[in-house]
Amino acid sequence: MQNKFFPEIHNNFGFGMMRLPMLGDEVDIAQTRQMVDAFLSAGFNYFDTAHGYIGGRSELAIRETLTGRYPRDRYILTDKLTGSYFEKQEDIVPLFEKQLAACGVDYFDFYLMHSQDAASFEKFKRCRAYETALELKEQGRVKHVGLSFHDKADVLERILTEYPQMEVVQIQFNYLDYEDPSVESRKVYEVCEKFGKPVIVMEPVKGGKLVSLPEEAHRILADLGGGSDASYAIRYAASFPQICMVLSGMSDTVQMADNLSFMRDFRPMDDRELAAVEKVRDILSSMGTVPCTGCRYCTEGCPMGIRIPDILAYLNEKIMFNQWNEYFYRREAIRNASASDCIKCGQCEDICPQHLPIRDLLEQAAEVFER
């Protein structure tokens, strides 16, 4: 089935290659190949990466598992221009060339201005990043130009007003964030509708938080009569009319098989399912969990090497299930750094797409786990 917005895309489900299976610090290439093969065999063809994903390993894995094994017309490949890798306009094209080489292609189907918010947009404007990307499109080295977005609706309205040439917007969109005032998923989606921009969804399962729900919430979905917790989250996002693509960051063949089972013959949510999801949202919203999606942007610049998303995940586990694995936390803390080792430099908060008060959260985690 062709995509209703971009006919070259098959269906409305994409492989987000940010959370690939790992063997230690390296990508599990053999398992990733199996996942790529299954994804293509099921009739899908959209792959998404960025230069910094998995410490630069995602693009290289794409070359080993996809682009080096399949002809160019078998897949659609999206990459992104990330602000931390350039300081002036002259840096952008060499970075772009490096990305092409890493991925093993001579053009990108989609090239997105990455992780746009009010601050990064000013840098991208100053460096004429949008203009440079549009020039690459004129040269045929990029087929479509768009942006990925992490801020409030008024900021997106400003960007699309200043750059109406943008063809697509990638946003964080899931049922838990739909009315969250810190994310404004609904309002951001409505701005895309207003400007007639197709929407690519990232974080439909909110970094895994909607994959394995607390028992009370899980029971509501289970009573519907079938489907994993993840299936309802992904189908929810895909059911909105302006959505052209939902990305899933699958990290093993089991997740791939589950996702393909319900997206191969996609069926929009019905009223009964939507009502159940709203009940689940109310339960989760009342629990006070930390809205970290595990993107790991914060870890790259941490001078203490603290695995912040892991510590926040342990904190959420205690909040949601009233339990946590002390041995596992201690092992991770010893191997890296404990929450109490934070020096409060704030680099993590500057780059966090969710705008979390990470320094305060690490203090809280230290009190919970290290007292």
Image: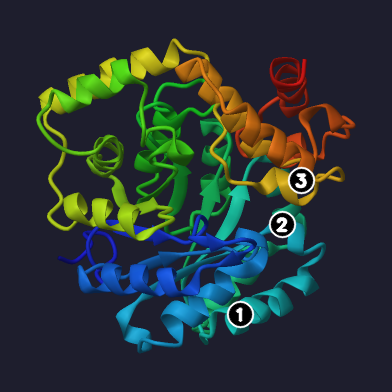
User: Residue at position x 27%, y 69% from top?
Assistant: 38
Q: Mark 3 sits on what residue?
A: 335
- Toward the top, the furthest residue is 286
Give the class, few, some or many, for how many residues have Cα within 10 Å of label 2's Cα (few <14, many ≥20).
Answer: some
Q: CA distance from mark 2 to mark 3?
A: 30 Å
Q: Is residue 123 above or below residue 134?
A: above
Please state which amino acid type lies under the numbered disc 3: Arg
Q: CA distance from mark 1 to mark 3?
A: 30 Å
Q: CA distance from mark 1 to mark 2?
A: 18 Å
Q: Mark 2 sits on what residue?
A: 83
From the viewer's perspective, is the residue at label 2 or at label 3 nearer?
Answer: 3
Q: Mark 1 sits on what residue?
A: 102
Give the class, few, some or many, for how many residues have Cα within 10 Å of label 1's Cα (few <14, many ≥20).
Answer: some
Q: Earlier in the sequence, mark 2 or mark 3?
A: 2
**Disc 2 secondary structure class:** helix
Please state which amino acid type lies under the numbered disc 2: Gly
- Toward the front, the furthest residue is 327
